[in-house]
Image (spheres, rainbow, N blue to C red):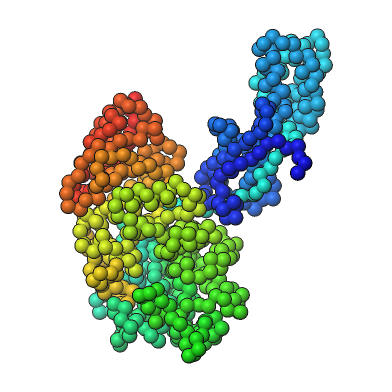
Amino acid sequence: MYTRNRVLIERVTPIVDDGSYYAKRVINDLLRVEADLVSDGHDIINGDLKFKVPGSKVWKYMPLQLHENDRWYANLELKEEGTYEYTVEAWVDYALTWQHNVRRKVESGVEIKVELKDFLPIATQLSHKAKGKDKKWIEDFSRLINSQKLYNKAVELAISDELELVLRKYPVKEYATEYDRVLRVRVERSKAEFSTWYEFFPRSASKNKNRTGTLKDAESQLKRIADLGFDVVYLPPIHPIGEEFRKGKNNSPSAKKGEPGSPWAIGSKHGGHKSIHPDLGTIKDFEKLVATAHKLGLEIAMDFALQCAPDHPYVKEHPEWFKWRSDGTVQYAENPPKKYQDILPIYFETKDYKNLWNELLSIALFWADKGIRIFRVDNPHTKPIRFWQWLISEVHKKYPDCIFLSEAFTKPKIMQALAKVGFTQSYTYYTWRNTKYELVEYLTELTKGPEREYFRPNFWPNTPDINPFILQDGSEHAFLTRLFMAATISSNYGIYGPVFEQMVHDSIPGKEEYLDSEKYEARYWDWDKNNRLIAMIKLINALRKIHPALQQTFDIHFCNIENEQLIAYHKRSKNGDEHILCIVNLDPYNKQSGMVQLPLHRMPSNPGDNLIIKDLITDNSYNWHDEWNYIELTPTLPFHLFKIHFKS
């Protein structure tokens, strides 16, 4: 290939799968774009970040800055929600190369009369681009070059900073190289990055033991949830529940009279995915619930579960949307050894797939029209990934602020693929990462690898499906530490309550499942109950709202600490002004102590500086002067949440 552009552009970041998918950021973030710019010879090279803001067809330009070792960067402030496009262009900068060479000659006492004349073609190009005072400056300089009497003045201007500023402001991009891909970054609202979730079943929200809960009862719980510091309330499915093959208590294959069944078995004679279960209330009740939540600073997250009970209206109206077996039945959902006889999977490979997809899209749009802007998507990994890419994109056309949480506990690459195609947040393996080694390894993968550009983790210590073994002994230590780490490591976290805060832990023997699970029955809870864990939830959530370092996930550093039962991590705010140090005792039975090493390379301090360390949990303060400091934690209060203040 014949070409005169000499600069190579390599290793552009951020980039997701060679630009096939977009990176993710939130409003007011800085997007740091980096690239290697390499060329032959000793000429000066230059480059621009080339970008389009959402909705614009016009390219804008921002100069790249040299970082080190041919690595260049630009920081783009993302002031608008939507999708930005960006790429990089670079060129041999003949104008700056000319000035660099004449400066060296002048420093060496060499006459530059010829070199000054050589600048005139460049001056002509600049005069066509420059405006106002800059244009006049170039024209005046050109006249000096043509005047033999004013040679010394021309030399003075030739090597001046004023000329360099003009050359950089109006670069002459002869034979520029443009990166061969246009990349994208999706900029979302702040809640995509920082959210605090609370899940509960409306049918268990009643304070009256003699009846099950309704949406009105759920509405009465919102003030309590807001007071605890949560900002997202996630409701399991509130639709009619199938009556055929209904599950009974503790996942019994058949329900007894009066047993309500699983909310995830959606659809009955009372309606489907666009209907409210008649025992819960009406659409008007739901709209009032949403409005009350907004007044309290909460958002309602809707469960989006694309599956059907055998008596869902779709089964009769659109039998082609299900895969029928030779015996005239549809194979129910299975995840061996688990069997879901009350759920029929949708057949996405049907010949009528276009009508199917459009109908499923209409479900999301129906609830978005009712004020829902957050969807928790049930088992998205059991539906085509391209379907989700299409559906999320279509929803965003009308409701660009919609957030989608992927509830997929499956193979890593499938979870990653779902995040790439559009899911805003993702459930994680945190629920099963318990030891120091497991936590450090997993968080390093999430925050230091390529996933950090597109995979936003959401940490849950428990869910209705998962009663993790670590919580099954009911120890307060386990609930405290799992809460603390979820809330301080990840900027997005949630709990399933009131099961979590009341430390409910009874399990089916040998399984990570709750005994008497709310998935299969309505429960009665003492919603006014109080305990130490509830107080700690309220405090930690309040601290999360105050401290910016806890509102991001990816700037985390695990500190050296001389004890495998202690884990320590340092977090910074995005602007680098706030520094938080968290230390946790993972041992539920014993006091643990050790020496923790402060990551001074991440702080505006040096060994010997006076550091005031304030524990935001106890309000105690300490003076540290050294890089290594002694720590001691008991199982009773198994963590420190330190804010670091620097004094010279």
- In the rendered view of the protein, which quadrant contains the C terminus? top left
* 176 horizontally vs 71: left or right: right
The percent coordinates of residue 266 (x first, y second) are 43, 78
Residue 331, compared with residue 401, is above or below; it is: below
Residue lying furthest left = 590
* Side of 438 where 169 appears, left or right: right
Residue at the (47%, 84%) spot, across then down:
330
- Observer-nearest of 291 and 276: 276
Residue furthest front in the image: 1
Q: Position of residue 591 (x, y in %)?
A: 17, 46
Instruction: Report which quarter residue 412 is drawn in.
Output: bottom left
Quarter containing the N terminus: top right
| Residue at point 56%, 53% (across, down) | 17
- The quadrant in which residue 483 appears is bottom left
**Residue displayed at 54% across by 60% down:** 421
Work out whether 140 lies above or below 636: above
Q: Is residue 603 above or below residue 313?
A: above
